[in-house]
């Protein structure tokens, strides 16, 4: 079985959150000053060692990517937003202009150093900025942008997403199944396949959580569904052996369809399901990871024992004595098995 590896490419502020998605980043991305005069542009092209086929039509450059295998530049050409890709020797692979005049008398204006959102072996997803059609020469950010998908190898445009005029723009996460995109101040979700074709889009309603970061220990099950830690409670259970009640750490997980925002199922797991009251006094449990392997969701958690390290002061610390797990059916939420792993 092919294991889905959970990792992040950047440090993210999702406290205690296991996940199979990552923020999209560009390690080789470089910012620089604008190049607007013809002499500036010619000097830049020479220094960067790229040979665009129509360099005299370039009026603005503010996008530069230099990898070991290719180079990308972008900006403005013939009063249109423009992007071009070159091989490592600077030979042009494609040059593409966004020429459309859109609603509200807007037209595509330019690309810049903040445009690239996704770049991989299949697609480039980039923000293309607008300007007023009555002033096509202008370079401004007052009219918003649109997320456009082009083919990485040919430059052919694949798809466009809705107009966005929010300061937060787009947040892009890559999952094993698709790219998951949050728009603006998380007012809308998009999902696109790894080849750039559109999967779905949806406006958020007023009651739901805004953004994937709110879903703790979140893992994507496919391009629509997620599984995450919802809540934990203590529940008093009766022990026949001790003829007493003892508290149980009950952890609740949910699977949600993000496309239609509906609950698929809810799972309640008792982490100390077989511990008597006397054991529980010095025992605690902590959720470790949530992962997916084909059709099985594995939830791992640690069992910790309180250890007194100073009998006089009573100082203590918790030592991990077991790693336990539940395996859950991904489609139904039914518990398959519970078991133990070696303690760390």
Image (tube, rainbow, N blue to C red):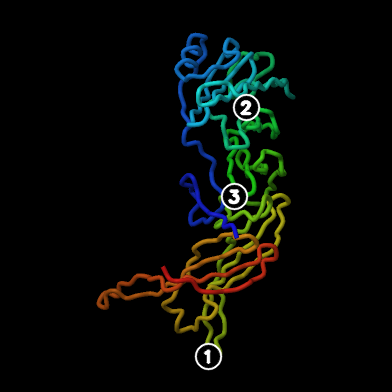
Crowd tier of the residue under label 3, counting other residues whose Cα lies within 10 Å: few below 14, some 14–19, many 20 or above: some
Q: Vertically, is 161 above or below 84?
A: below
Query: In this view of the protein, which residue sits in the foreground, 214 or 172?
Result: 172
Q: Which quadrant holds the N terminus?
A: bottom right
In the rendered image, which residue does mark 2 sit on?
A: 128
Secondary structure under tag 1 reads loop
- How many numbered discs? 3
Secondary structure under tag 3 reads helix
In the rendered image, which residue does mark 1 sit on?
A: 241
Residue 270 sits in quarter: bottom right
Secondary structure under tag 2 reads strand
Residue that extends furthest to the left in the rendered view of this protein: 312
How far apart, in angstroms, are the residues tagged by discs 2 and 3?
25 Å
Q: Vertically, is 230 above or below 168?
A: below
How far apart, in angstroms, are the residues tagged by discs 1 and 3?
44 Å
**Residue 334's x, y, as percent?**
67, 70
Tell me if 34 is positioned left or right of 312 in this view: right
Residue sitting at x 55%, y 54%: 19
**Residue 267's x, y, as percent?**
64, 67
Residue sitting at x 58%, y 44%: 173
How far apart, in angstroms, are the residues tagged by discs 1 and 2?
68 Å
Residue 47 sits in quarter: top left
In the rendered image, which residue does mark 3 sit on?
A: 212
Mark 1 / mark 2, whichever is N-terminal: 2
Mark in front: 1 vs 2:
2
Residue sitting at x 58%, y 18%: 139
Mark 2 / mark 3, whichever is N-terminal: 2
Query: In this view of the protein, which residue sits in the foreground, 41 or 214?
Result: 41
Mark 1 / mark 3, whichever is N-terminal: 3
Tell me if 306 is positioned left or right of 8 in this view: left
Q: Which mark is residue 213?
A: none
Q: Vertically, is 131 above or below 16?
A: above
């Amino acid at each position: 079985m092919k294991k889905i590896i959970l990792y992040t490419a950047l440090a993210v502020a999702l406290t205690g959150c296991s996940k199979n998605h990552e923020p999209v980043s560009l390690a080789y991305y470089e910012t620089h000053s604008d190049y607007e005069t013809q002499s500036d542009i010619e000097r830049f092209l020479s220094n960067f060692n790229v040979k665009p086929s129509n360099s005299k039509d370039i009026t603005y450059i503010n996008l530069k990517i230099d990898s070991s295998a290719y180079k990308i530049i972008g900006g403005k050409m013939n009063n249109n937003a423009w992007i071009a890709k070159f091989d490592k020797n600077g030979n042009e692979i494609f040059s593409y202009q966004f020429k459309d005049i859109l609603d509200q008398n807007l037209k595509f204006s330019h690309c810049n150093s903040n445009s690239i959102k996704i770049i991989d072996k299949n697609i480039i997803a980039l923000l293309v900025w607008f300007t007023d059609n009555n002033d096509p020469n202008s370079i401004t950010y007052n009219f918003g942008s649109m997320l456009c998908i082009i083919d990485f190898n040919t430059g052919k445009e694949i798809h466009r997403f809705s107009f966005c005029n929010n300061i937060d723009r787009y947040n892009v996460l890559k999952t094993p199944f698709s790219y998951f995109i949050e728009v603006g101040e998380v007012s809308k979700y998009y999902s696109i396949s790894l080849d750039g074709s559109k999967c779905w889009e949806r406006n958020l309603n007023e009651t739901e959580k805004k953004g994937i970061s709110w879903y703790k220990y979140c893992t994507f099950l496919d391009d629509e569904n997620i599984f995450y830690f919802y809540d934990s409670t203590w529940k008093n259970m009766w022990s026949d052996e001790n003829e007493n009640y003892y508290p149980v750490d009950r952890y609740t997980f949910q699977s949600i369809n993000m496309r239609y925002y509906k609950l698929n199922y809810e799972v309640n797991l008792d982490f100390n399901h077989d511990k008597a009251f006397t054991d529980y006094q010095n025992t605690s449990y902590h959720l470790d990871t949530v992962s997916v392997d084909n059709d099985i969701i594995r939830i791992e958690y640690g069992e910790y024992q309180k250890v007194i390290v100073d009998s006089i002061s009573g100082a203590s610390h918790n030592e991990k004595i077991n790693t336990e797990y539940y395996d859950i059916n991904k489609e139904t939420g039914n518990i398959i098995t519970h078991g133990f792993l070696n303690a760390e």
